[in-house]
Image: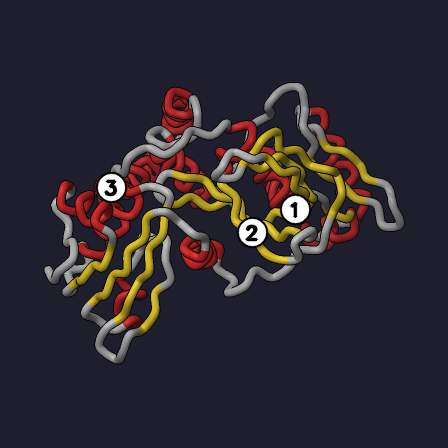
Amino acid sequence: MPARMLRLLSLLQSRREWPGTELAERLGVTGRTVRRDIGRLRELGYPVDATTGTAGGYRLASGRNLPPLLLDDDEAVAVAVGLRTAAEGSVSGIEETSVRALAKLEQVLPARLRAQVAAVGEATVAVRPRRGPLVDPAVLAVLARACRDHELVGFGHRGREGAVTERRVEPHSLVTLHSRWYLLAFDPGREDWRTFRVDRLDRPATTHRRFTPRELPGGDAAAFLARSLPAAPYPHTALVTLEAPAEEVAARLHTPVPGPLEPADEHRCTVRLGADSLDLVAQSVGVLAALGTGITVEASERVRERLRIAGLPGSGTA
């Protein structure tokens, strides 16, 4: 396949839709050449649809068969590392599927990329928390496409008490925290941002209605999730005080915890944890204790007992 066609295929895979004029500009060719290259891609089995409109354009559609997927070096390494992680993840049925896909990918990886994947695996120390609720990969696929394509999505949402309400939201991001999947979205009906546990969503489906993306408060999805979770009236909470400045802790804290980091004074900071599960609170305390600063935990007797069982700092200083 000529280099220009590979570049064209890479562009089509990177975005939902491309105007023909923009493709021609990116490739440095005429619109006629783009049309000819699109025809060649179709002959090779790539389902490229032409879109109508004033400018006209192209998009890579879903086909009956999976054509070859074009990945650059960084993308190939990222996919391989992601498959290794997914093999031990919280998506229903993903373990065996991920292992099969990883075997196929590693078989065709150049030696230089196999070495990079191996290096990442050897340098990574994985913390194995208790497995969270399993989610359907088809549900994740629907939500991920809706986030990418800025399409409204509707679903039934099951609350903590079991009541189901129908929601229609503007999806922004999918985020994982402590083996749980969350959807961050703006809820027009409530005129505010909301966080939804994916395992509590029923029959999510896109409405095929587009929306203009809003800016997420703070800009960072993981930080937004960590801030928003403790705001709900969770049954298990803990106030953790760390003997280090907030800036230092933030720089060293690479694993999100369900609670905002706030300065107590110039030498100390606090994190207010909140979760449905005692295990999640204990895991978060373990993450904070691993930073090696002095730590004090104020919590209920049930939380303190769970921390004692785990050998973690309870109500006192470690």
Q: The residue under label 1 is which amino acid type?
A: Val
SS for callout 1: strand
What residue sits right under mark 3 in the picture? 127
Point out the tag, 3 or 1, that comes first from the N-terminus.
3
What residue sits right under mark 2 in the picture? 194
Image-based side of 24 in relation to 172, left or right: right
Determine whether label 2 and label 1 are within 8 Å by CB: yes
Give the spatial CA distance, label 3 vs label 2.
Answer: 28 Å
Camera-nearest residue between 84 and 179? 179
Image-based side of 188 in relation to 265, left or right: right
Give the spatial CA distance, label 2 vs label 1.
Answer: 9 Å
Q: Indicate the position of residue 2 as horizontal and vertical percent values.
A: 61, 37
Write the residue at 36% across / 34% down. Answer: 132
Q: Indicate the position of residue 248 as horizontal and vertical percent values.
A: 26, 70
Q: The residue under label 2 is which amino acid type?
A: Arg
Point out the tag, 3 or 2, that comes first from the N-terminus.
3
Give the number of the disc on residue 248. Answer: none
Give the spatial CA distance, label 3 vs label 1.
Answer: 33 Å
What residue sits right under mark 1 in the picture? 169
**Height in image: 97 above or below 275?**
above
Camera-nearest residue between 169 and 111? 169
SS for callout 3: loop
Write the residue at 58% across / 37% down. Answer: 157
Camera-nearest residue between 173 and 267? 267
Quarter the C terminus occupies: bottom left
